[in-house]
Amino acid sequence: MKMINLTINNVPVEVPEGTTLIQAALKAGFKVPSLCWHPDLAPTAACGICVCDVEGYPVPKRACATPVTEGMKVNTNSRELRELRKTILELVLANHDVKCPTCVANGKCELQQLAYTMDIDMEKVPKLLEMKPIDYSSPSIVRDTNKCINCGRCITVCNDIQTVYALTFADRGFEAHVDTAMSWGIGNSACVNCGQCTVYCPTGALREKDDTDKVWDALLDPTKHVVVQEAPSIRASLGDEFGMDMGTVTPGKMYAALRALGFDSVMDTNFTADLTIMEEGTECVENLKKHTGKPVITSCSPGWVKFVETYYPDLTPYVSTAKSPMSMFGALSKTYYPEVHGLDPKDIVSVAIMPCTAKKFEAQRPELARDGVPDTDIVLTTREFLRMIHEAGIDFQNIKEAKPDEGMSFYTGAGTIFGATGGVMEAAIRSAYFLVTGQDLENPNIEAVRGLKGVKEAVITIPGFGDVKVAVANGLGNARKVMDKIQQQINETGSTEYHFVEIMACPGGCVGGGGQPFGNGIAQRARRGEALYKEDANMDFRCSHHNPEITKIYADYLEKPGSHKAHELLHTYYFGRDKFKGQVEKQTTGLDSHH
C-alpha cells in the first residue's frame, strides 16, 4: 500500500493513499469540525464546515472529500476558517427548530455540540425557519424536517448501505430538502423501519416513535400485570450511557433497573432466542432431510422480513415461519405465563425492550395477534429505556444486581449471541448438529460466521447428512447480494447451494440496531458483539437444547419442537408488499402451505 506524507498544522503525518484530509487530521491529532461527515459513511461534502486551507489552492478545501497528496501542507485553524465555519453554522441554525432541552437528541446532538464549541450566540442568529408538519406516518420512526440540516447522512445509509431507497433529496438550491417519494410520508414509502437513519442523523430530525408514556401508564395501573422482556444486545449497550466500559454486559443491573421501574415480572428475550433455535433449527433439519434444494432463511429481524416481502416476494416461501424471539415471548406471555400463574390474559401487558425500531412495526403486524390481541403490546427501544431510567432517577452504575423471574428467563450462550451478526447461525448450527446426530459439537465456536464482514459463508459437515452450506449477511445491501444470488440460482436450476441463511437488517446485527444509543458506529457495534461472545464463552450451557426452562416448557406446554401447538403459537406467515405505498399486495406463503 502506497503511503503519503504531508503536514497538518506543521505536524508531519504519514497515511495510506486515498485517505481524506479529515481522516489524516485525526491521525495527526486534530479534529476538523464537521456535520455531514461520518466515518462509517461515504462523504457527501454537504455542509462545508470542514473547510481547511491547503497550500497552493486559492480557496479552502472540504476536508471530508479531499484526498491527501504527497507533500501537501494543510492548515485546519485560522481566523478566516473559524469565521467561515461560524457563518455556515449560523445559517444552519437560522433554519433549525432550536428546542434543545426537549429534543430527544439533547446532549447527543452534533449540531448542539458544534454550536457550543464555536461559541455561537443564538440571540444574534436570525430566525428564518418556516415550520412544517412533523411526519408521524410510520409506526416506528418520526421525521421532523424542522430539525433536518440536509447533511444527507440518512439518504446515504438508506440508499447506499441498506439499499431501501426510502429517502431522497427533493427540490434544488435553497428549497432542497430530504423527503420521501411523492412526499407521501415515511410510513407510506419503501421504508422497512430499520432505523439506521435515526442512528446516523446528527440531530433529532429522525427518531423513534416514543411509547414510554404507554409503559408508565401500564406500570401505574393497579389492574394490569406488566411483563417485560429484553433483547440479547440490550445488556451490552446500556452501560455505555452511564460511563461504564464500552460493551460491558450488564444483565443483573438491567434486571434491577426494570424492577425499580415497577415491572411485575422481569424475564428475558434470550430465553425465547433459545426457543427460536429449537423451532427454526427443527425446521432447518426437516428441510435438510427432504433434500429440497431450497434454503431456510432466518426470520428474527423484522426490518429484513419487510425487506424480503417488499423486494423479493418470490423468496418469502423460504423464510422460516418461526416468529422472532420477541414475538414468541409475547405469545407465551399471553398464554403459557398466565396459565402457570393463574392470571387473566386480558390483564397482561407484554412489554419488549428492543435495540430495534422495526420491532415497533413487528408488534403491530396483524398476523402476530390472536383474536385481535397482539402478542406484544408495547415495544421500547434501548434509547427509550434509557430515558425511563433517567426519569426514574435510577443510579444504574451502582444499582445492586438482581435476578430475573423464573419460567421464561434462563438462557444459554446460544441465546445471548443472537445479538451479533452470525450469532443466530452459530446457535442454530450447534443445535441442528445435535438434532441430526444426537451429539454435541466438540467445539461449539463457529468462527467462520463471526465478525462484521458483510457476507460470510461456511460449510459445516454433519455426520449422517454431509456438507451443509450456510451464508450470513448483515446490512440490507449485503442481504440483497445474497438474495440476488439465491434468486438467480433457483431461476436457473430450481435449487440453490445454500441450506441455511441468516440475515440481519442492521450492520453488525442487533448490537447495531436502529434503537440503540446515539453514536452507535461500527466500532461500537464490534465491541458490543465481542462482549456477547465473551458472555457466551463463560456460560455453563452454550446450546439451546440444553436450556432446562426450554426442556420444561416443551414437556409442560408445547409438547415438542414443531408440534401443532408450537406452530399455533410460535409460527406465522408473510406477504408481498407494494414498495411504493407500503400496502399489502399479495400473500405469497402461509403457515399451512409452508409446512
Image (tube, rainbow, N blue to C red):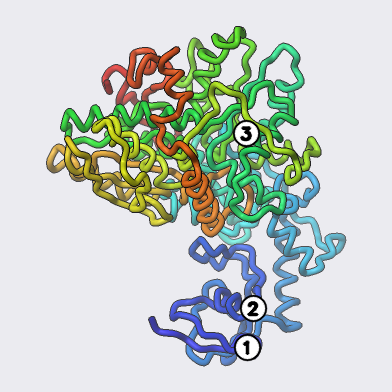
Q: Is residue 574 visible?
A: no
- The amino acid type found where label 2 is placed reads Gly
* Residue 29: mark in rendering: 2
Is label 2 in contact with label 1 (beta carbons under 8 Å)?
yes
Residue 453 relative to residue 375: left or right = left
Q: Residues within 10 Å of mark 1 (few under 14, many from 20)?
A: some
In the rendered image, residue 440, in percent from the top left (x then y), is placed at 32, 37
Q: Nearer the viewer, residue 189 or 467?
A: 467
Q: Give the structural element (helix, strand or loop) at label 1.
A: strand
How far is disc 2 from disc 1 in space, using C-alphas?
A: 9 Å
Location of residue 67 in the rendering, given as x and y in whole percent from the top left corner:
49, 79
Q: Quadrant of the N terminus?
A: bottom left
Q: Secondary structure at mark 2?
A: loop
The quadrant where residue 334 appears: top right
Residue 464 seen in the figure: yes
Q: Quadrant of residue 489?
A: top left
- Residue bearing mark 3: 380
Q: How busy is the neighbourhood of tag 2: few (under 14 within 10 Å), some, or many (20 plus)?
A: few
| Amino acid, disc 1 | Val
Horizontal side of 291 relative to 554 (left or right) equals: left
Q: Which residue is mark 1?
A: 11
